[in-house]
Every structure is written in C-alpha cells, then in structure tokens.
Image (cartoon, grey):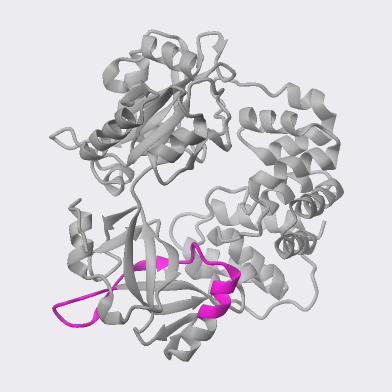
Amino acid sequence: MLFDQVVQTSARVAATSSRTAKVAALAETLAAASGDELLIAAHYLSGSLRQRRTGVGWRSVTDRPTPAAEPTLTVQAVDAAFAELALLAGTGSQGVRASLLSELMGAATAGEQAFLAGLITGETRQGALEGLLIPAIAAAFSVGVDAVRRAAMFAGSIPMVAVAARADGEDALAAITLQVGRPVLPMLASSAPTIAEALGRLGAGAPVAVEAKLDGIRIQVHADGDDIAVYSRSLDDITVRLPAVVAAVAALPARRLVLDGEALALGADGRPLLFQDTASAQAPLVPFFFDLLHVDEADLVDEPTALRHERLAALVPDELRVARLVTADLDAAEDFSRRVLAAGHEGVVIKALDAPYAAGRRGAAWVKVKPVHTLDLVVLAVEWGSGRRSGWLSNIHLGARDEATGGFVMLGKTFKGMTDEMLAWQTERFLGLETSREGHIVHVRPEQVVEVAFDGVQRSTRYPGGMALRFARVVRYREDKRPGDADTLATVRALARGTEVTG
C-alpha cells in the first residue's frame, strides 16, 4: 500500500464533518491493507507511530528538503525508516538521524511531508484518531462495534485489534480478554464546569462517588506473584522509575492484581508537589489507588463502581487510596471539593456508582471538575501550521505584561482551541502585524490581546519569566482590550504560588 493512500484518506476525513463519511473512508483503507500493512496503516490513521520514541523532535521537521514529484513511498518503507530511527543511540547518532530523516522526507511528496511532520509532532488532527477507528474496524471486517471496543480495552491497542478482526472476526475479538501483565486502555473522564452540572449528568438525587483528582502520573499496576509491573497512561512500562509503588503493591494481601491510580510526589508537609516535580522523578513517588480491575482470579471490569471500590477498600489501606466521599448532596460534594483544593490537588472526579470500567473511553460515567484559570495575554509571534493547518498561522506565542519594563515576557505557546474560522482570521490579522520572520516563525507587533484558559503555572527554564502555562488553549480574541490591559507577570506569579487573584 502506498503511503499516499493513507495521506489521501486522512485528507478525506478532514474534509468532511460527517461521522458516517469519516468512518467509511477509514474502513475502505483498512480493508484494502494487507499483511503487515494493516497494523501500520491503522497507527497512521489514528495519528500515531508504531514506535513510541524515535528521537525526532518538532525542530527536525521545520526545514524540509525539496519534495518528490510523485508518491512512491509505501507504508512499510515509512515504518522501516522510523524503526531505524528509533534504534539509533550513542555518539554520532544525531547526525545519522538527521541524514535518515532527510532521506525519508526527500522521498515524500509535499502532502506526505506534511503528514509525516504531523505524525512526528503529534499534530495529525484529522478527526479520525482512535474513537473513529473502532467503528471503522467494525465496518471494514463486518464485526460488531461493541466487540471491537471491548477487545481494544483488553488488548491496549486498537491497531492490534484491527489485525485480529481481519484474521478471524468476532471469535478472535472474543478471545482477547484481560490478562494480568498486559496493560489495558485506561478509563477516562469527561469534563464539567461545575459540580452541580456533573451531578446533574449522573442523575439528580442519585448517590455518587466524589473523589480527589490528583495531579500526578496515571499508573496501572499489574501484579502476578512477585512479578510487578507499572504502566503509564500511554501504556509504557515505567516500573524501574517507581520502586516505592512496586514495594507498596508487593505488601498487599493478594497474589494477582490489576490496580488503577496515580503516583504523586509529596513534600515534607505531606502536600503534593508540582506536577513537573512529580514527572521529573527526582522525588520518590507514592501511589494512590482509586480502582481495582482484577484480584486473584476475579475480573472486576464489568462490575459496578461501588463493588469495585468495596473490594479495593478491603485490599488497599486508607493511606494508599484516593480520598473519596459518597453522597447525593450538592453542598457536601462542594465542601469536599473545597477541602481537596485546599490540600493542593487539582479538583474532583465524580463517578456513577453503577458504572462498569469502560476502558479507553471518555464517557459519561466519570466527570471531572477542576477550576479553570484564564489570563488576557498578548500575542508576540505566530508559527506557520503543518498538516491540515498548512497555509495558516497557527501556534501563537503568549506574553504577559512586565510592569517594570513596559514590555512583554513570553510564557509559552498554544495551537489549541482554534476553529478554522479563527485560523483564517488570525492569519490575516497577524500578517498585518508582522515585523520580521525567523524560519517558520512570524514575529508581530504586540498589539493583539487573547484570552487563554490553562490548568496551572509551572516553573520553566525555557522562557525568560521562569514560568510556563500548562495546557494553555485559546478562549477568544479580545478586540475590546488593548495591550496595556493584559495581565501582568505579578498576576501569573501569584497564580503560580496558588494565590487567588481577583480583578
């Protein structure tokens, strides 16, 4: 299969808003793949590489060689190139990596180059991704959607399920079950702006579990006797990084376990450290568990939340479990949330007590509620987009006002939250404010104010203010505000300290 077929399918998916048309386009290409092509094509159509790490960063794809005139690359050739890149290490590997990447890019057409860049940087957002692959697999190989979804949960890989579905249909899918030692896709939570709305979604008056939302590393722990493995949210094996987690699980009174939870770094006062301190692995990480999927010979994924937590509480001591309240009362839930926030955590997750564990889905049974901060910042520069954003100015550089100098200090970048209409508007707007260019970066006069939502502030050596916004996304452009109305560095520093700032 030519790589161009995947690229063209991705373009067809991006060009339509119809879910039915998206699924049909994906199914057609999946059905046409043969042999090893199917696994590779399914990864690419989901916007991911088979290789978890290639050593290639976004800077490596900004300067591209002259594209090929006609498509000749196959999906297998592309996969082989990334596999070779992933194996490179040691002295001289950077030069070899650059040469191999240039060779791959040089064999690609302009459209293929843009798609490759999106795969490398994780910016291939064509509306397919894993959510649409499940019904596409079902359509391509005439199997049930629920059978595909359940198999994907236990396999931990939707592309692998595509291979199984083609090989032996629903019989092969039914054979994929939970296995201790093989990570499953984690259950995810949807979002709500308030606790009242979250409770309403789960059924007014119904008791729910209100749990602390920790800002740590999502972990899934599999124990089979003395063999204990810890996996990340992306199903990477991180066992060697978390000896305290392994020790804690080894002390539990069960031989076979699958636990879901968070690993968190705590300060001397017992309060959680910043996420970046947890992620840096410089401090020992303590586990806090909130779900139990398997114990000894019993699978619990189909059991209701209430029963799973009952079994969890009987197995795991209080100090290793996430704080939890069962209530139907809004005031009680809000009071619990305030206490959780005061303890330094992110917010709460509200869970239906009768729900099974729906792995890999951001469903209605779990709803997270956490404070959203917003700032009015000034755009300092913009980067040309890639993939489906080619030809538009996309990634904006964000600056806060420095009251001491009268200038602006960069706090990070974002391309999130932008509609196509917004991209078209900002391309015209920022080209009108252009002062200079540096490669793919267009520097602009600091005149446009943008409202940005974000989850928190973290330390950063990358930006001159020593801070960066976490998970920043555009809310709207503020035509009613001038640069002098933008938020200041002092405001951002106060947020970083956890101080409430009003005004």
Drawn side of residue 366 relative to residue 128, left or right: left
The residue depicted at 34 percent of the width and 33 percent of the height is 263
Question: Foreground residue, 144 or 170?
Answer: 144
Drawn side of residue 199 relative to residue 212, left or right: right
Q: Which residues are magenta?
A: 400-426
Task: Please say whether residue 268 is visible from this viewpoint.
Answer: yes
Residue 412 picture location, percent across and down: 35, 67
The quadrant in which residue 318 appears is top left
Residue 181 picture location, percent across and down: 54, 23
* Image: 443 above or below 62: below
The residue depicted at 26 percent of the width and 39 percent of the height is 341
The quadrant in which residue 195 appears is top left
> Is residue 402 rendered magenta in the image?
yes
Drawn side of residue 208 relative to residue 126, left or right: left
Task: Please say whether residue 107 is visible from this viewpoint.
Answer: no
Residue at the front extreme? Answer: 205
